Image (cartoon, rainbow, N blue to C red):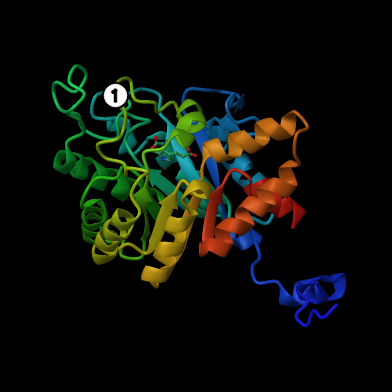
């Protein structure tokens, strides 16, 4: 045999670590947590076994569980005590996220990010102010500019409560610029913005909509979230966010969109984040619960692939499982 190049030489146990190109560290991960103003006890999320909604009183304890695994950052989602057409509980000073953020920042060292959206707060479940006939006419949808005003209020209220980074996920045009302007005007120049810039209209959000009670009562989000068929459009979308002052650029979902992660990595110098979403967690978890695959192995491999594609940070429901193992 005349084989000169033998890649297997570098796969022995002694050298594998030296030549490994990518790793996943606890510091790369952000753990999403769900705080629910309507409950007094923790509630298991049916569509995401292993995850719970916690009452506001438990938000600090929940954050400490994350910190104990070595993960330093949490992303907060809120389930409000009431909903209305404009989602007014989303910017209330005594809103669920605002109260939880105040406690978490006062009592822990966690780095706190908040999701900024209206879908958990509106009675129709859309991510903004809807057009009058939206329920009956599927071609009309969320009004962009009136929604921006509400998003600005939410961002400022989260920053007032102590959030260090806000993450607008509603896919409204101009949302990053609107938030940057509002934060600066309110004296929050050092609060960062992680834009869900390339957020696709995805079936992988199914379990989350149950977890956060934010499913649209009618229609879908295809008029504001991106079409999964489009890749070049993602670069264009994200460029707009960069021009408006985004600090971190996010792709969502992650695994079915690794080409987009790689494209953004190549096109911009900003940190790139990927959101390994609820459906990606639920699939692995469901198979693992049946004994069909190893959750830890597949979760780690998934996160590794997201890093390899070019992401610097990952939002993932596996954060605690994986950090514990590392
Ligand atoms: C709010 C929001 C959603 C997710 C994060 N923020 C749901 C959606 O857009 O329908 C999904 C997260 C997940 O699936 O884990 N707009």
Residue at the (46%, 46%) spot, across then down? 253
Residue 319: give x, y in percent of width and height: 63, 49
The reply to whether residue 177 is in sight is: yes
- Specify whether 93 is left or right of 153: right
- Specify whether 280 is left or right of 86: right
Task: State whether label 1 is within 8 Å of ligand 1.
Answer: no
Above or below: residue 140 compared with residue 322? above
Residue at the (45%, 29%) spot, across then down? 209
The quadrant holding residue 135 is top left
Residue at the (36%, 69%) spot, across then down? 267
Residue extending farthest top? 136
Above or below: residue 237 compared with residue 293? below
Q: Quadrant of ligand 1?
A: top left
Q: Pick the residue in front: 48 or 280.
A: 280
The quadrant holding residue 240 is bottom left
* Element under disc 1: loop
Q: Pick the residue in front: 138 or 58.
A: 138
Per the image, the residue denoted by label 1 is: 219
- Specify whether 34 is left or right of 162: right
- Specify whether 320 is left or right of 129: right
- Name the quadrant of the C terminus: bottom right
Q: Pick the residue in front: 11 or 116.
A: 11
Residue 219: give x, y in percent of width and height: 29, 24
Residue 168: give x, y in percent of width and height: 34, 48
Residue at the (40%, 63%) spot, across then down? 264
Residue 8: give x, y in percent of width and height: 80, 72
The quadrant holding residue 318 is top right
- Name the quadrant of the N terminus: bottom right
The reply to whether residue 109 is in sight is: no
Above or below: residue 220 compared with residue 189? above
Mark 1 nearby-residue class (10 Å; few <14, some 14–19, many ≥20): some
């Amino acid at each position: 045999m005349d084989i000169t190049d033998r890649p297997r030489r570098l796969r022995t146990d002694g050298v594998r670590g030296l030549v490994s190109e990518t790793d996943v560290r606890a510091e790369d991960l952000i753990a999403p947590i769900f705080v629910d103003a309507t409950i007094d006890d923790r509630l298991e999320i049916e569509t995401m076994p292993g995850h719970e909604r916690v009452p506001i009183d438990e938000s600090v304890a929940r954050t400490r569980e994350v910190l104990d695994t070595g993960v330093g950052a949490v992303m907060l989602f809120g389930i409000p005590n009431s909903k209305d057409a404009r989602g007014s509980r989303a910017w209330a000073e005594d809103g669920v996220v605002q109260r939880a953020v105040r406690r978490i920042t006062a009592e822990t060292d966690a780095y706190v990010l908040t999701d900024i959206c209206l879908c958990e707060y509106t009675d129709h479940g859309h991510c903004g102010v809807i057009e009058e006939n939206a329920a009956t006419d599927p071609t009309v949808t969320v009004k962009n500019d009136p929604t921006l005003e509400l998003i600005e209020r939410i961002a400022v209220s989260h920053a007032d409560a102590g959030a260090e980074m806000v993450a607008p996920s509603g896919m409204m045009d101009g949302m990053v610029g609107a938030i940057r302007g509002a934060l600066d005007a309110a004296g929050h120049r050092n609060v960062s913005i992680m834009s869900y810039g390339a957020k696709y209209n995805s079936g992988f959000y199914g379990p989350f909509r149950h977890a956060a009670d934010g499913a649209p009562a009618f229609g879908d989000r295809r008029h504001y979230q991106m079409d999964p068929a489009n890749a070049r459009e993602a670069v264009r979308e994200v460029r707009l966010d960069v021009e408006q002052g985004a600090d971190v650029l996010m792709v969502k979902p992650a695994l079915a969109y690794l080409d987009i992660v790689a494209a953004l990595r190549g096109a911009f110098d900003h940190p790139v984040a990927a959101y390994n979403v609820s459906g990606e967690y639920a699939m692995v978890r469901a198979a693992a619960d049946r004994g069909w695959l190893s959750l830890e192995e597949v979760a780690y491999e998934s996160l590794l692939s997201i890093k390899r594609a070019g992401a610097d940070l990952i939002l993932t429901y596996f954060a605690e499982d994986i950090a514990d193992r590392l």
